[in-house]
Amino acid sequence: MSIFRAYDVRGLYPSELNEELAYKIGRAFVSFVKVKSVVVSMDMRVSSESLKKELIRGITDQGADVIEIEGLCSTPKHYFAAWFLKAPSSIMVTASHNPGQYNGFKFTREKAIAISGDTGIKDIERLVIGNDFKEPSRKGKVVSKDVTSDYKKHLLKFMPKKIKPMKIVIDAGNGTGGKELELVLDDFKELKLVKMYFEPDGTFPNHESNPLLEENTVDIRKRVVKEKADIGIAPDGDADRVFFFDEKGNAVSGDLITALIGESLLEKNPGGKIVYDLRSSWVTAEYIMEAGGKPIMYRVGHAFIKDKMRKEDAILGGEVSCHFYLKDNFNTDSGIIASLIMIGIMSKKGKKMSEIIKPLKKYYASGEINSSVKDKDGKMKELAAIYKKGKVSWMDGVRVDFDDWWFNVRPSNTEPLLRLNLEAKSKKLMEEKRDEVLGIIMV
């Protein structure tokens, strides 16, 4: 599998991604985007410092200047820096939620617009492989910037000025999100914060920084119950995603959080459009419509969601995987901002998290189930033919809707896998149809 992926560059250090390759990527990036300056930031991974150093050398050797963001940085803070400094491009050194032995790069153009496989990553890969770069007339220079105070001002826009007393457990997972939540929340004396694993450490000594995996949330779920906290918050390693837990320690799925944040934003943006990914529960669209919004279903993936938001002038985008994108955050995802908004929602509603979520739990979902399949396209066509009496869509893989259940089967970009998501109006029907569809996939 190539380390040049659909949304970023990511690979094992140093066997797949190393300093020599980082240097070439720096030169290739400047050759492709043809810009005069690049914002560069890094996360807390052990290899980030050396990779950043060689990346910067490649950028400057190709003739572009570098604005190096001081200190450790989350991906949301990096996006802010790129936008705030009006940079024509940027590169973030991070492997997001991957284990510590991984590292990678996220690329943007102007206005923090992500570069994906379709819009440049594959072109950068070809330039790296070719390793034939034109020598510039001058080398670039490096300047350092600290955007922390301006970033804090930006974050505070999403936090109510008055907050009801609340106890919050935050598991930062030794990533960059804890310190950035602390930057804002420590100012609110009404909030009692229980801080877990806040020290950035790229070896991830306590657990991996991927809260999507249940084994990585054992500690926070127990701690929320033990502390009798109102809510649990767990950003992933680079804090572009965030996961929430109710006072009983139960995880709250991303599509329900999308609905809640959407309802909150619609109070100030009546009639606003909200983009949500097609794995989301029926209730997401229903809740948005009840709040006076216009729900728009779209395909999975941050580059796709962000592009759709810009085209539709949407106020929010949300994914089941707990990415939350805001128009007022230049259409980028921020687990930090989503956390601030959710704290505000809980304060305003004055209810327990489980009580807020209860009306949204109308349907029964299978969760995402992966199956190894050799002929992914053939199997999806087979499913479409078998379930042709339903409403068939090819927006992202195959999705089929019936009156009382629906399913979506999407292919993995990097592995011989099909991913099934299914929902029904009763638990019995969900289990029956889940097993039925899986039986077809596995044959």
Image: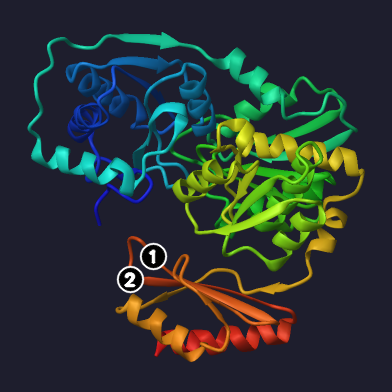
* Lateral position of residue 129 relative to residue 330, left or right: left
> Does residue 77 sit above or below 339 in this rendering?
above
Q: Position of residue 284 (x, y in %)?
A: 71, 60
Residue at 27% over, 9% down: 141
Residue at 40% over, 10% down: 144
- Crowding at dot 2, Cα within 10 Å, few <14 / some 14-19 / many 20+, comes out as some
Q: Answer whether residue 8 is visible to the viewer in this image.
A: yes
Q: Position of residue 362 (x, y in %)?
A: 79, 70
Residue at 87% over, 30% down: 163
Q: Answer whether residue 221 is visible to the viewer in this image.
A: no
Residue closest to the eye, 233 or 155: 155
Q: Residue 108's image quarter? A: top left
**Which amino acid lies under the numbered mark 2 shown in the image of this protein?**
Pro
Query: Which mark identifies residue 151?
Result: none
Where the N terminus falls, by quadrant? bottom left
Exactly how many numbered labels are in the figure?
A: 2
Query: Which mark identifies residue 412?
Result: 1
* Lateral position of residue 111 relative to residue 156, left or right: left
> Does residue 112 sit above or below 37 in this rendering?
below
Residue at 17% over, 18% down: 61
Secondary structure type for disc 1? loop
Residue closest to the eye, 180 or 391: 391
Residue closest to the eye, 277 or 272: 272
Q: Position of residue 336 (x, y in %)?
A: 63, 34
Q: Contact, CB < 8 Å: mark 2 with mark 1?
A: yes
Disc 2: which residue: 416
Q: Position of residue 115 (x, y in %)?
A: 37, 39
CA–CA distance in space, label 2 to label 1: 7 Å
Secondary structure type for disc 2? loop
